[in-house]
Image (cartoon, helix red, strand yellow):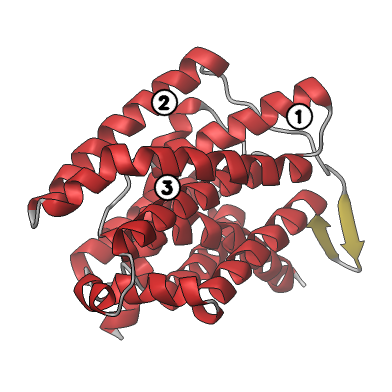
Amino acid sequence: MLAVQLLINGILLGGTYVLIAQSLNLIFGVMRVVNLAHGSFIVMAGLFTFWLSARTGLSPLIVLPIVFVVSFVVGALLQPVLIEPLMNQGRRAELLSLMVTFGLDYVLVQIALHVWGADYVSLPYLQSTWTFGAITLSKALVVVGLFAVGIVALLYFGLNYTSFGKALLAASQSPVGAACCGINVRRVRLFAFALGIALASSAGTLLIMILPMAAESADNLTILAFVIVALGGLGEYAGVTIAAFLLGLAQSLAGYFLGGDAANVLPFVILIAVMLLWPQGLRRAA
């Protein structure tokens, strides 16, 4: 029963990680932009959710669509100003985007520190458990995991079964070819960036229910997303999904057998190993 317990916990945690990683992967897949401000958007959304829920008593699940819409608008406003001008810089675009998003990350973290302070906070929501025989499940973890998987499932459906989603995938595979087919690549890039920011922010709203969070958590969350994307392969949606669940399982096992500190360090160890041994990602290496 212990193995089943750890397996379920790992799968639920991995479901949340899928949302964290796919939002980063979406932006890179379409724009070839590695967003170093990824974690700061997650943290901003999480701290905002904590503040709003504490002030109004609203359920974070009600705050979730508010955060999604607001952050989508923020992403849509930032992309033409900060990212789109870099798209015409050729090979320099990736390096310049790293510098710009690094600066954006610093600004967002400083805003979070000024508005919410440096203390770690968590949202006491669904703190009870469900018990099925010898298996005990945290209600918060179950709800967060299922909501995250549901959002990613909607993303998968949108990308593969809607005309705009197919246009987005086409632009990620070949911007020139997509433009030749009449696709407005500039508009697709704007939508992809805004959607990526909205998904990352949604992850923050969910994570605050199961994970203590502070402004300084931003870099750790960015690295966590990078680990998963590195495992699955940049731009590989299926590979990243598999990698997210594998990391969730690995942390569940490490946390039980080696303690919480080992579980927290594990993503960094995996990142180093993958970069040294399989820099193209495990899925492509296989």
44, 213: nearer the viewer:
44
* Tag in front: 3 or 2: 2
Q: Which residue is mark 3?
A: 265
Furthest residue toward front: 182
Residue at figure coordinates x 41%, y 26% from the top left: 109
266 vs 155: above or below = above
Residue 91: give x, y in percent of width and height. 8, 57
**In screen coordinates, is 94 left or right of 219?**
left
Furthest residue toward bottom: 286
Query: Circle 2: is it few (<14), some (14-19), or many (20+) Cα within 10 Å?
Result: many
**In screen coordinates, is 10 left or right of 247?**
right
Residue at figure coordinates x 69%, y 46% from the top left: 65
* Tag in front: 1 or 3: 1
Q: Which residue is mark 1?
A: 53
Q: Are marks 1 and 2 in contact (CB under 8 Å)?
A: no
Work out whether mark 1 precedes mark 3 in sequence or the reverse, and give the earlier one. Answer: 1
* Amino acid on which disc 3 is placed: Val
